[in-house]
Amino acid sequence: MAARKRASADASTEAKVQEKPKSQDSVPAEPPTAPLNLKSGFILKLSLLLLGPYCYLIFHHYNIDRDLKKSILINAVVSLAGFFVTLKMIPVASKYVLRRNLFGYDINKRGTYGGTLRVPESLGIVIGIVFLVLAIVFQYFNFTSDSIWLVEYNAALASICFMTLLGFVDDVLDVPWRVKLLLPSFAALPLLMAYAGHTTIIIPKPLIPYVGLQILDLGWMYKLYMGLLAVFCTNSINIHAGLNGLEVGQTVVIASAILIHNIMQIGASKDPEYKQAHAFSIYLVQPLLATSLGLLSYNWYPSSVFVGDTYTYFAGMTMAVVGILGHFSETLLIFFAPQVLNFLLSLPQLSGLVPCPRHRLPRFDSKTGLLTGTNDGTLVNFTLRLLGRMSENSLCIVLLVFQAIACFLCFLLRHFLAGWYK
């Protein structure tokens, strides 16, 4: 969900208007379009801040196997190419979606000039396509025809592709919330059917005396858990939204944390299969991060494009896939702590116990340019009620800092519980 109001259905057909002599009293045939402003300076600073620790761990802190490091660096180069392709493709795609009247108006700028601008919608489709092309091309450099990871890698791509398609369908058809909750279940089917990994969990050490087992095989229940995780990740990104840059920003922060976690596990482990599982995760997260940074260049405040449900579903499914196949779903859920909190706050409205409006957004004061929290159950409104009124840009930064703090606390939690919990 983005802070937008879609164009009316009456605008779905392009009218052919004959040219008329220009006059001072003439009125534009259509509202102006939001200019495509590239926030390159901001993206550069954000990239250095988030990727600095990751690069330090790879090149200096850990002695990573040469072949594995080579594969990670090849993937990084391919991802970097995807970043520049994304920057070039978004302006091109914006023209096409505007031509088909896929645009919206920014509700959080209503009453100002920015609220009258047509903002291109559903640009997440560009990110999904570029990501899939990068992931497929990377197979040439890393996987052989007899690789044990190839089947699960392609199954993961099939699930991501399926979810991207369903997200775009949602953007076009605007399906009801109850249907949205089910869409990730269908998209996760290729991954669940191809999954050939273990279905066991390690019992936490404090619970072993009570359970009587160190390892518990869940069987089909493990796959059910995987499907539920995919449903949660996709929808949690989708409902924690409504501000310029928030959907993509939270994805960038979580993806950076996943990369750091994976490289720490690779550096600390001596098990080749365990290392490959986390390298598998890196191969998918680096392209996700690179393409998302390209999208954020246009989606940061003031947004030039809207990402749509296409991007939120795509990003959520990608992170669910890497958490499942990388075998760190518990850590992933802690990274998603703000999304879990937002879901708990939203539950009364989503379940129908409390009336749920179409847009659960804060109120915008066009005179001051500040947002005021409403009684709707979202983390966005809760933050405004807690901290007071603030601008949209400041609110988004506060929420992304909270996301980063949650990821940092996850690393601290793993450090202090190491050797005691598992």
Image (cartoon, rainbow, N blue to C red):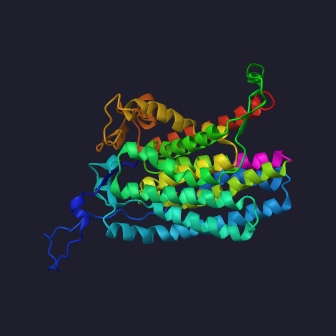
Q: How far across and down, in percent of the image, does residue 105 sit?
A: 31, 54
Q: In the visual, does 10 lie left or right of 168?
A: left
Is residue 23 left or right of 95 when viewed as pictured? left
- Res 412 → quadrant: top right
Comparing 101 with 45, the one in front is 101
Residue 142 highlighted magenta (yes or no): no
Residue 386, image x, y percentages? 45, 28
Q: Position of residue 411 (x, y in %)?
A: 70, 37
Q: Residue at x 70, y 52 (%)?
A: 52
Magenta-span inclusion, residue 268 = yes
Is residue 407 shown to the viewer in this render?
no
Q: Nearer the viewer, residue 15 or 141?
A: 141
Residue at image x 39%, y 35%? 350
- Residue 371 visible? The answer is yes
* Residue furthest out toward the top: 210
Quarter occupied by residue 29: bottom left
Quadrant of the drawing holding the C terminus? top right
In this image, 310 relative to 104: left or right?
Answer: right
Residue range (magenta):
260-270
